[in-house]
Image (cartoon, rainbow, N blue to C red):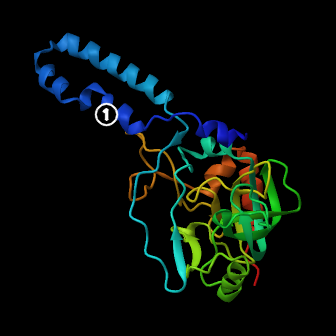
Amino acid sequence: MTQLDIYKSLGEIDPKIIIAAAPENNRNYRQRKRWIGVGTAAGFAVLVVVVMLMLQSLQPSVISRPSYEAPSLPEGPYVGVAVSSDWQVYRDAKSLIEYADLILAGRVTDIGFQILDTRTALPADEQTPTYAKMLYTIYTVEVLESYQGDATDVIHVRIMGGMVGERTEEQLTLMESEGISGDGRGIPILEDYQKVQCRIGESYLFVLAAFETGVPTILNIDQSIYSLTEPTKENAVGQNPADYYGKKRDEYGYPLISAKDIIVEFGKKEWKEFYEKWKEGAFSALK
């Protein structure tokens, strides 16, 4: 059992529940407050502030992603794979680091495809039942900087599903050879595949989970892969407290975090060293 498995067995508290429980958001409280004396109201307001600060400090590091309408599938032989309900969204860069096993900056040098056993993340074999076979995309990554975990010079990263516009016939042939395309299904792709679809020669910050079997994989579809073309670009969801201001937000109101936010958590020195190398072109895409 990994740290992710342990956490998934625990409950979670939606920050919206805490916010909704605040007295100022309660209708009965708003009706009663006109009868409270000025001195009592002032004292009560101080108490509310203290309680809210205490509750905010108890907010979980992991939050639930709200339901959303799946994006339209691209043209071609593709079948959408819904995001796993087990994938959690982490409230900020610090929490993301806490639950990640590997964090590294690397350049994708190759892209391949494999049929893996979804129960073990190992290559499917004759004993693997059809229902447990799934097409995966496998990135070969040259490690340029390692921030957390034991990363070798080259690692592989697995992403559930295939890729859009990348050797389509090869993917279909592989599925057919493993007997998982006889029902006319197309290439399975994650509904938000753009967030984890990498390109050969380009560099990314990877935030990964490692399990007992299989190569590392993403923590979730929103917060695991960051293009290093613009390391300060905020493009991954974070927390949603009522008093969090000054950050760009996604369509659900969740503030966004960047590769810089994650690297800075390891120290300003690490960010300075990264940025100097970035300016020198160490992370630039190869032609």
Above or below for 143 versus 40: below
Farthest residue to the right: give it. Answer: 153
Pointer 1 residue: 20
Residue 65 in view of the camera: yes
> Between 144 and 124, which is closer to the camera in this rendering?
124
Above or below for 92 versus 202: above
Q: Quadrant of the C terminus?
A: bottom right
Q: Residue at x 75, y 72 (%)?
A: 114
Q: Quadrant of the N terminus?
A: top right
Residue 283 in view of the camera: no
> Between 224 and 71, which is closer to the camera in this rendering?
71
Q: Residue at x 56, y 45 (%)?
A: 92
Mark 1 residue element: helix
Residue 50 horizontal/vertical position (percent)? 40, 20
> Between 222 and 135, which is closer to the camera in this rendering?
135
Residue 45 horizontal/vertical position (percent)? 28, 19
Farthest residue to the bottom: give it. Answer: 169
Residue 27 horizontal/vertical position (percent)? 18, 30
Res. 29 image quadrant: top left
Amino acid of disc 1: Ala
Residue 47 horizontal/vertical position (percent)? 34, 16
